[in-house]
Image: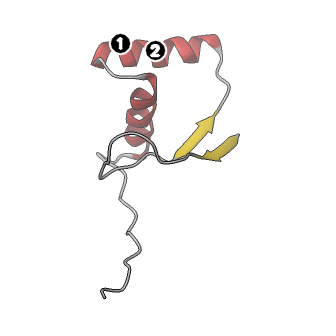
Amino acid sequence: MLLVAMTRTGRPTQDPKNLRISLRLADRDGEALDAIARKYGVSISEAARRVLRTALGVSALPKRKRKRRPHR
């Protein structure tokens, strides 16, 4: 599995997706993921996140705490 940190681009968000994961799927697994994406009208990435959350039994993955800079 290949993990790559992504650079900051696009609009500001409260839930940045900075981790890119590359994996290989069998044709039937890719088709199943594509069917889920079409069913809910979301991207393949969002469908994969939903499948992961369902498998973990959570509605949303916990957010990491942000490092706070000292107030000046």
Query: Most extreme residue toward the front, as rendered?
Result: 72
| Closer-to-camera residue (46/66) | 66
State the image coordinates of residue 22 (x, y, percent, origin top left).
Answer: 64, 33
Residue pictured at 62% horizontal, 11% vertical? 27
Which quarter of the figure is the C terminus placed in? bottom left
Q: Amino acid at mark 1?
A: Arg
Q: Is residue 63 above or below residue 27?
A: below
Q: CA distance from mark 2 to mark 1?
A: 6 Å
Q: Is residue 69 above or below residue 30?
A: below
| Closer-to-camera residue (12/67) | 12
Mark 2 touching mark 1, by CB under 8 A? yes
| Closer-to-camera residue (26/2) | 2
The quadrant where residue 44 appears: top left
Report the residue marked by disc 1: 38
Question: Exactly how many numbered labels are in the figure?
Answer: 2
Disc 2: CA contacts within 10 A as few (<14), some (14-19) or many (>=20): some
Mark drawn on residue 34: 2
Which quarter of the figure is the N terminus placed in? top right
Q: Amino acid at mark 2?
A: Asp
Residue pictured at 68% horizontal, 25% vertical? 24
State the image coordinates of residue 46 (x, y, percent, origin top left).
Answer: 39, 31
The quadrant where residue 62 appears: bottom left
Q: Is residue 4 left or right of residue 69?
A: right
Residue pictured at 42% horizontal, 33% vertical? 51
Disc 1: CA contacts within 10 A as few (<14), some (14-19) or many (>=20): few
Q: Secondary structure at mark 2?
A: helix
Specify the color scheme: secondary structure
Q: Is residue 31 left or right of residue 46?
A: right
